[in-house]
């Protein structure tokens, strides 16, 4: 599990890409400290397993499903990426619950200055916008942000100067693709409400009410 608070911006050193897989080598300093083979690191919001860890870099494999769902297939040597290690059990929960499992991608529409903040508008498909709510949380390339508002084809977030300087978001351009992870609590809630428990009956009888104290 992650929090969406980016620890470091890393740089892709090389990519070994096949038709349905990729291996990334990422130059990084902070996130390799204390990291072992098998540990999880979020790369632009995508939870990847470190398969090689050396001083100053790590490598991770990316499966076909991850390439389909995310923007990782667009990375090139020299690309900058947001990095976060899995949350420590004794760490502060400063962002929101981020699983590192990308729901899909969005496209940056534009940037607008508003006081100290930069407002970023991101276009997304209706199936993703359905789970994005005003004042709720969203992970964009792994960055935990608060949703300002949601329209029919896009949503907006505000980025304070600190977040902008410590992540890659404000270095992007209109038309760039970003990874999106919507709030997992909303997805679980929807499933529980729309799917009855296996073996459960839809019928409410007098016997059922009596057995449950009514």
Image: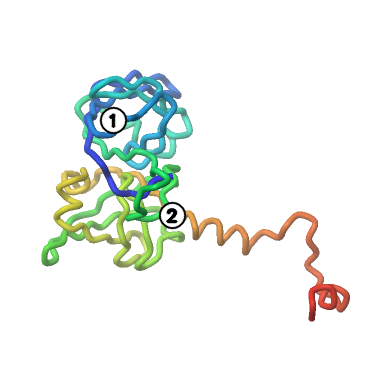
Number of marks: 2
* Marking on residue 128: 2
Q: Quadrant of residue 121?
A: bottom left
Q: Earlier in the sequence, mark 1 or mark 2?
A: 1
On screen, 81 above or below 107? above
- Number of the front mark, 1 or 2: 1
Q: How is the image coloured?
A: rainbow
Q: Is residue 59 left or right of residue 173?
A: right
Looking at this view, is 100 or 156 the one in front? 100
Q: Where is residue 210 in the image (x, y as percent from the top left)?
A: 85, 78
| CA neighbours of label 1 inside 10 A, class few (<14), some (14 to 19), many (20+) | some
- Residue for point 45% across, 59% down: 131
Q: Position of residue 126 (x, y in %)?
A: 43, 57
Q: Where is residue 162 in the image (x, y as percent from the top left)?
A: 16, 53
Looking at this view, is 174 or 141 the one in front? 141
Residue under numbered circle 1: 33
| CA neighbours of label 2 inside 10 A, class few (<14), some (14 to 19), many (20+) | some
Looking at this view, is 30 or 188 the one in front? 30
Q: Is residue 71 left or right of residue 27?
A: right
Q: In which quarter of the image is the C terminus?
A: bottom right
- Residue for point 78% across, 61% down: 200
Q: Quadrant of residue 33?
A: top left
On screen, 41 above or below 90? above
């Amino acid at each position: 599990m992650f929090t969406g608070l980016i620890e470091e911006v890393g740089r892709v050193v090389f990519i070994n890409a096949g038709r349905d897989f990729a291996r990334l080598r990422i130059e990084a300093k902070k996130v390799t400290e204390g990291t072992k083979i098998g540990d999880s690191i979020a790369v632009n919001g995508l939870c990847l397993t470190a398969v090689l860890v050396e001083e100053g870099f790590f490598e991770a494999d990316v499966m076909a499903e991850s390439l389909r769902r995310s923007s990782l297939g667009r990375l090139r040597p020299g690309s900058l990426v947001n990095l976060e290690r899995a949350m420590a059990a004794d760490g502060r929960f400063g962002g929101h619950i981020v699983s590192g499992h990308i729901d899909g991608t969005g496209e940056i529409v534009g940037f607008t200055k508003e006081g100290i903040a930069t407002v970023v508008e991101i276009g997304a498909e209706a199936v993703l916008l359905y789970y994005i709510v005003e004042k709720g949380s969203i992970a964009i390339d792994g960055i935990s942000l608060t949703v300002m508002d949601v329209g029919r084809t896009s949503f907006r977030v505000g980025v304070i100067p600190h977040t902008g300087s410590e992540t890659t978001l404000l270095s992007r351009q209109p038309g760039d693709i970003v990874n999106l992870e919507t709030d997992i609590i909303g997805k679980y809630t929807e499933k529980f409400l729309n799917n009855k428990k296996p073996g459960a009956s839809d019928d409410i009888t007098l016997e059922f009410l009596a057995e449950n104290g009514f």
